[in-house]
């Protein structure tokens, strides 16, 4: 007798059964499912539908099913369509007919929505810790590498000198916003659907507030039709996960480029690199390439679910079973990827000398314009004048610092011999001391602020 045994004469086509089964992936929800059922048994007993002995029997049986999952003893059987039916089937084998009372007033529709939220809330806590770990590594290394000056790029063209730590800390802020966003997603996920039934609500006067408190939810859903089909929290989580992966990918891309022989700014530690089966000299940044490459599937999961949800009729439809695999994969991908990113940064070899050698006088052109500005020349004009100096230096094939004073003064009389003091990369960095700038004092206070935020997490 299947779940709907009474109604059907013909048994399900075998291929159809396999097509519809979700146990192959939703077994992961066993903890959430059992937790939800234990709480629901309490709710049933509070509502007077079962007595306290039956409630305890259900709870003890469910504990045994959980133990079987945890020890690997649980055996999935034909007919175990999904995690909910599998747990209930096994519960019946262990405790007998009382197991049949557990589903009173409950539907797999409010059950699965509850399980998924519980599962996501638990996993989000772990992912938050992983992000926190990455943030800590970023802060520690930024603090340790404060001496290093490097060429900063825009449009991948040399722009202005910055501290390497300033570049690295830029990722602190991206990932810190990711922590904040995750907390927002968790807040909205913590709404309880259980007690919504199939779509119309629970007819047994279940105390949903008590259920929510038991299960650690902050609120109960206010509309049973919405509650059984609301997967906004999964969409939000997948959007969050895709953005985290985009951030990891951006971090990876800079480091992959800088680890190339042409740059040689950094070297990825051997622990996070691979060799080539053909070329003995190769040291490939596979760790970072995978962090970059996995962005495709992460964005795909978000688009996939949005597409599934688009145009679904109200309340539960089986389409919603498609909400899980992308979610699980997104969780797995980040659970693996975040510690890898942390490991790469923790062990990264940074070649400050190579970075310094790559600094070109052209990167001080803005400072040169600022020199004139400090002598009262409007910036738009000084920008133009320095452009002429750059062109003149190019014509004479000399760096800006070797352009003769007569050349500078021919361009503008306000250029004095002290103009050559501008040609100092450290001075250029130190000048950008306003809050948020690359001056060492500013980066130090940026790091101090980051530490306060980390302590607040
Ligand atoms: N396995 C189903 C899912 O993941 C559980 C809910 C099934 N509900 C139903 N009415 N068939 O969505």
Image (cartoon, grey):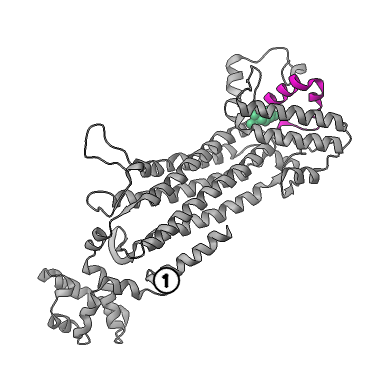
> Which residue is at 55% across, 33% downward?
325
**On-image quarter of the C terminus:** bottom right
Query: In the depicted view, which residue is nearer to us: 108 or 32?
Result: 32
Occupied quadrant, residue 29: top right
| Residue 332 appears in the rendering | yes
Occupied quadrant, residue 294: top left
Up the image or down, 90 lies above or below 220; here it is above
> Which residue is at 51% across, 38% downward?
332
Residue 8 percent coordinates (x, y): 73, 16
Occupied quadrant, residue 122: top right
Q: Which residue is mark 1?
A: 442
Q: Is residue 452 left or right of residue 353?
A: right
Q: Quadrant of ligand 1?
A: top right
Q: Is residue 115 left or right of residue 251?
A: right
> Which residue is at 72% across, 50% downward?
218
| Residue 204 appears in the rendering | no
């Amino acid at each position: 007798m299947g779940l709907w045994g009474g109604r059907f004469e013909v048994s399900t086509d075998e291929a159809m059964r396999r097509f519809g089964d979700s146990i192959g992936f939703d077994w992961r929800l066993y903890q959430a499912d059992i937790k939800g059922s234990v709480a629901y048994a309490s709710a049933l007993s509070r509502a007077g539908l079962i007595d306290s002995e039956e409630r305890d029997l259900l709870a003890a049986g469910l504990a045994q099913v959980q133990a079987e999952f945890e020890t690997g003893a649980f055996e999935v059987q034909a007919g175990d369509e999904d995690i909910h039916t599998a747990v209930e089937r096994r519960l019946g084998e262990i405790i007998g007919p009382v197991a049949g009372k557990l589903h009173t007033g409950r539907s797999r529709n409010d059950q699965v929505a509850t399980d998924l939220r519980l599962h996501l809330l638990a996993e989000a806590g772990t992912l938050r810790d992983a992000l926190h770990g990455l943030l800590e590594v970023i802060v520690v290394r930024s603090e340790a590498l404060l001496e290093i000056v490097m060429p900063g790029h825009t449009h991948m063209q040399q722009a202005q000198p910055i501290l390497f730590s300033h570049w690295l800390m830029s990722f602190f802020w991206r990932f810190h916003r990711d922590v904040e966003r995750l907390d927002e997603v968790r807040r909205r996920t913590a709404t309880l659907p259980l007690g919504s039934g199939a779509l119309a609500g629970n007819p047994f006067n279940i105390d949903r507030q008590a259920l929510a408190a038991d299960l650690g939810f902050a609120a109960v859903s206010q509309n049973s039709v919405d509650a059984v089909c609301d997967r906004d929290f999964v969409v939000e989580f997948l959007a969050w996960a895709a953005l985290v992966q985009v951030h990891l990918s951006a971090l990876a891309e800079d480091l992959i480029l800088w680890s190339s022989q042409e740059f040689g700014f950094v070297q990825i530690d051997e622990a996070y690199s691979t060799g080539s089966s053909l070329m003995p000299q190769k040291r490939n940044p596979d760790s970072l390439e995978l962090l970059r490459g996995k962005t495709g599937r992460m964005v795909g999961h978000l688009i996939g679910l949005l597409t599934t949800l688009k145009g679904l009729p109200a309340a539960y439809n089986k389409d919603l079973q498609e909400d899980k695999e992308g979610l699980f994969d997104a969780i797995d991908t980040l659970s693996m990827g975040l510690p890898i990113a942390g490991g790469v940064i923790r062990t990264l070899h940074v070649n400050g000398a190579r970075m310094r050698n790559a600094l070109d006088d052209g990167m001080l052109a803005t400072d040169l314009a600022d020199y004139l500005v400090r002598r009262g020349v409007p910036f738009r004009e000084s920008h133009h004048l320095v452009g002429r100096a750059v062109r003149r230096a190019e014509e004479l094939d000399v760096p800006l610092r070797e352009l003769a004073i007569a050349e500078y003064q021919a361009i503008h009389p306000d250029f004095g011999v002290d103009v050559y003091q501008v040609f100092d990369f450290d001075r250029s960095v130190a000048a950008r001391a306003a809050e948020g700038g690359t001056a060492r004092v500013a980066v130090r206070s940026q790091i101090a602020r980051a530490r306060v935020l980390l302590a607040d997490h």
